Image (tube, rainbow, N blue to C red):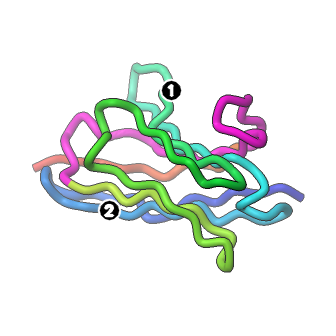
Amino acid sequence: QVQLVESGGGFVQPGGSLRLSCAVSGFTVDAYAIGWFRQAPGKEREGVSCIDSDDGRTFYEDSVKGRFTISRDNAKNTVYLQMNNLKPEDTAVYYCARGGYSCGADFSSWGQGTQVTVST
């Protein structure tokens, strides 16, 4: 059974950091592209970052480039999203999802999400 479980969300002040984890089961994390998405209240879901299977190429949405880093630990079957210099506009529910071989394919399996709130 394919499962993705996010954790690591929370409340942080602007400029702070959080590390999100996406623990997967039912497949190996390096066999599929894994993406991070977010959805803020009243807004559409948007892609934040993605890591390809195999070569591990990474991609970032423009607003998070230089602040967020996606990485993968094959031994732990987990993908991480390190978020630094957080801004109030980063507030959202963050989801991880399994794609195809590359980040350009559809994402078919999703986690339940973890809330990130950036505020004073």
| Label 1 crowd (10 A; few <14 / some 14-19 / many >=20) | some
Question: How many angstroms separate mark 2 from mark 1 (CA)?
Answer: 20 Å
The kind of residue tagged 1 is Arg
| Label 2 crowd (10 A; few <14 / some 14-19 / many >=20) | some
Q: Which mark is residue 45?
A: 1
- State the residue position of label 2: 18
The kind of residue tagged 2 is Leu
Residue drawn at the location 45% of the way across and 37% of the way down: 48
Identify the image quadrant of residue 28: bottom right
Label 2 vs 1, first from the N-terminus: 2
Q: Position of residue 26 (x, y in %)?
A: 85, 63
User: What's the magenta region?
Assistant: 85-109
Examine the structure image and report whether residue 17 is included in the region drawn in magenta: no
Residue drawn at the location 66% of the way across and 44% of the way down: 97
Indicate left or right for 87 with 73 as reference. Answer: left
Secondary element under disc 2, as helix, strand or loop, is strand
Q: Position of residue 51 (x, y in %)?
A: 58, 48
Which quadrant is home to the N terminus? Answer: bottom right
Q: Position of residue 45 (x, y in %)?
A: 50, 26
Residue drawn at the location 40% of the way across and 20% of the way down: 42
Secondary element under disc 1, as helix, strand or loop, is loop
The residue sitting at the left extreme is: 120
In depth, the one of 43 and 73 nearer the eye is 73
The residue sitting at the front extreme is: 55
Q: Position of residue 75 (x, y in %)?
A: 68, 79
Identify the image quadrant of residue 69: bottom left
| Whether residue 34 is situated above or below residue 5 in the rendered picture | above
Identify the image quadrant of residue 93: top left
Residue drawn at the location 70% of the way across and 51% of the way down: 53
